Amino acid sequence: MSLNQTPSANRIHIGIFGRRNAGKSSLLNALTSQSLSIVSPVKGTTTDPVQKTMELLPLGPVVLIDTPGLDDVGELGEKRVQKAFQALNKTDLVLLVADYSEGLSACEYDLLEAVRKKQLPCILVWNKWDLATVSSGENVCSSQKPAASGNLPAAAQNLPSICVSASLGWHIRELKELIGKTFPQKQQAPLIRDLVRPSDLVVLVIPIDTSAPKGRLILPQQQVIRDLLDGGAVSVVASDAELPQVLASFQKDPALVVCDSQVFHKVSPAVPLSVPLTSFSILFARYKGCLPSLAKGASFLDDLEDGSHILICEGCTHHRQCEDIGTVKLPAWIRRHTNKEFQFSFTSGTEFPADLNSYDFIIHCGSCMLPDREFQHRVRCAKDAGVPITNYGTVIAHMRGILERSLEPFQHLL
């Protein structure tokens, strides 16, 4: 992946919700000008969320999510509806698609209530407007909401709305403009560049072992390098084996050293105490807005009893190597640190348990592949369930006895 491609986690996520046959898939195809989702008069054609990345001006890079129908029925239908509501956890802006001639029903009201609780911006999209204009002779130049919308529930009364025909492409351009006006523009938070000054030297320590991908850097490493470039700082990349020689070659100490959390125990002794040291995982915990919670959660590892249930979560899916950090290294380090035996469970990608009550401790990856909103949702779920949560970098730093040092660059947040 090239450095100028925007990762999905950093894109604005726009969720398309509505009943079966409301035209959600047609709207996705119209917005992207591609036939991505299957369109059929058969209800329930979309059975799983479909995602598409694109540039949507004036917003910029976005992810469009086409979801299953909110009114699906039967045992499988209930699971599809659950998948649709789960998509709210990663959604920044909701497009609620309704049939112009049918108005809203109870299932849309349920979604609107969830949108209200999550404080998400929402646009009400009245679709199939072409069919209504043919039968009623309405002015096709009008994109205002139908007269029937005056009977909407309070949750929908003040929503921005627009009438479109996804199948014919009517007012799709106007919908894109409305999306740009409705979503509050946010300045992207810095990942690392606010911790250093222009021309500062930053050393990035990246281990090259059996779990390192061949011929490339992983996403967190790419993003840190790019953010340093944007801030005018100078990055030097070295392996942990080369670090002592690299540091000795400098005329002055670097402004910051960032390492992979797996090699904290090798890097810390080599870096002078006067030089700030942290990890990629801890940088991402700050970037995602969850560092205080994750740093606090790390210490709860020592309070766990024999037989406690630990959940280890990865935000992406990949082929696990024999020395995989999540399923192999972390459990071994935890047993060695605590001298106790635990029950371990593992999830990856979009999987995250709806019920956390059976777990005593949660360790999450750096979440570079997850949208901020989805990762923050997971942290809130753990907090609501009373289960301590931390991430790879903070818990490894805790076990190595250098958590306090690795958090020094962020003391103003803790």
Image (cartoon, grey):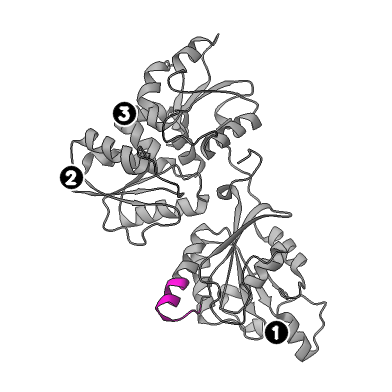
In the picture shown, does residue 42 fall above or below 233?
below
Secondary structure at numbered mark 3: helix
In the picture shown, does residue 409 fall above or below 150?
above
Q: Amino acid at mark 3?
A: Arg
Q: Amino acid at mark 1?
A: Ala
Residue found at the far bottom of this picture: 135
Dominant secondary-structure state across the stretch colored magenta: helix
| Bounds of the magenta segment | 71-81
Residue designated by label 3: 400
Secondary structure at numbered mark 1: helix
Residue designated by label 1: 147
> In x, y percent, where is residue 310?
28, 48
Residue designated by label 2: 305
Give the side of residue 375 with respect to residue 161, left or right: left
Give the side of residue 2 with respect to residue 404, left or right: right
Mark 1, other Cα within 10 Å: few <14 / some 14–19 / many ≥20: few
> In x, y percent, where is residue 117?
48, 65
> In x, y percent, where is residue 30?
71, 68
The first of marks 2 and 3 along the sequence is 2
Q: Nearer the viewer, mark 1 or mark 3?
A: 3
The first of marks 1 and 2 along the sequence is 1
